[in-house]
Amino acid sequence: MIKTFTGPMHSGKSSSMLREYFKIWNKEHIICFKPKIDDRDLGIIKSKDYKEGINAICINNFEEILPYINESIKNIFIDEVQFIKGNVNILSYLSLIYDINIYVAGLNMTSDLKGFLCMPEILSISDEIEIIKASCYDCGKEASYTYYEGKKDNDIKVGDKNYFPLCANCYRKRIGNEKLKKYFSNLFEIEK
């Protein structure tokens, strides 16, 4: 089984995943991973809802998980999975061949409305997907979008500084219709 917790920034994806972690009594049957690129809490998976963080092995790609697998591992937890590179089908292999339950948390979209790196593939192999909403930074309604305030040097900026969850209406207001149309112009022809 592969269960994915996804949604915008500040929605509680890691908290939801950690809730599953703390339900498991025998922690010796669990192994946790997070991407090396996310250096905010190196080697620790944390969330705002749990004071206690959990130790995680920092990896760059999915292939690095394989040497850690043995017959005692029954559950794998991966935070910020969108930053991990490599073949996502390794997760399917571990789930189907080794009967390991895999729980992952990651952003579904960039602030530019693109699928976030490997997340479209992760979502396609997931047995269960929990889309978690945030509270809109501007109006307080349910938020599904991540907005970045400022100028980014590249598509990927690790961390949560200057990122805000927004509902569709507030996202549209902040971005503006012309910029929003530009985001979609590469996907299909838009009426002028």
Image (spheres, rainbow, N blue to C red):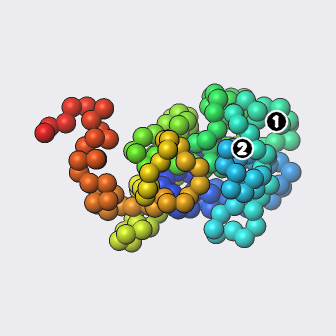
Q: Is residue 36 left or right of residue 164?
A: right
Residue 151 pos. (x, y %):
44, 51
Lower position in the chain sequence, tag 1 or tag 2: 2
Q: Toward the viewer: 70 or 152?
A: 152
Q: Which residue, given by chain and number where applicable, does mark 1 sit on?
A: 69
Above or below residue 135? Residue 160 is above
- Of tags 1 and 2, the one toward the viewer is 2
| Residue 171 falls in image quadrant | bottom left
Q: Residues within 10 Å of mark 1 (few under 14, many from 20)?
A: some
Q: Which residue, given by chain and number where applicable, does mark 2 sit on?
A: 36
Residue 24 shows up from this direction: no
Residue at left offset 40%, top offset 45%: 112
> Type of residue at label 1?
Ile
Q: Is residue 158 left or right of residue 54?
A: left
Residue 86 shows up from this direction: yes
Residue 72 pos. (x, y %):
86, 41
Residue at left offset 67%, top offset 44%: 37
Q: Residues within 10 Å of mark 2 (few under 14, many from 20)?
A: some
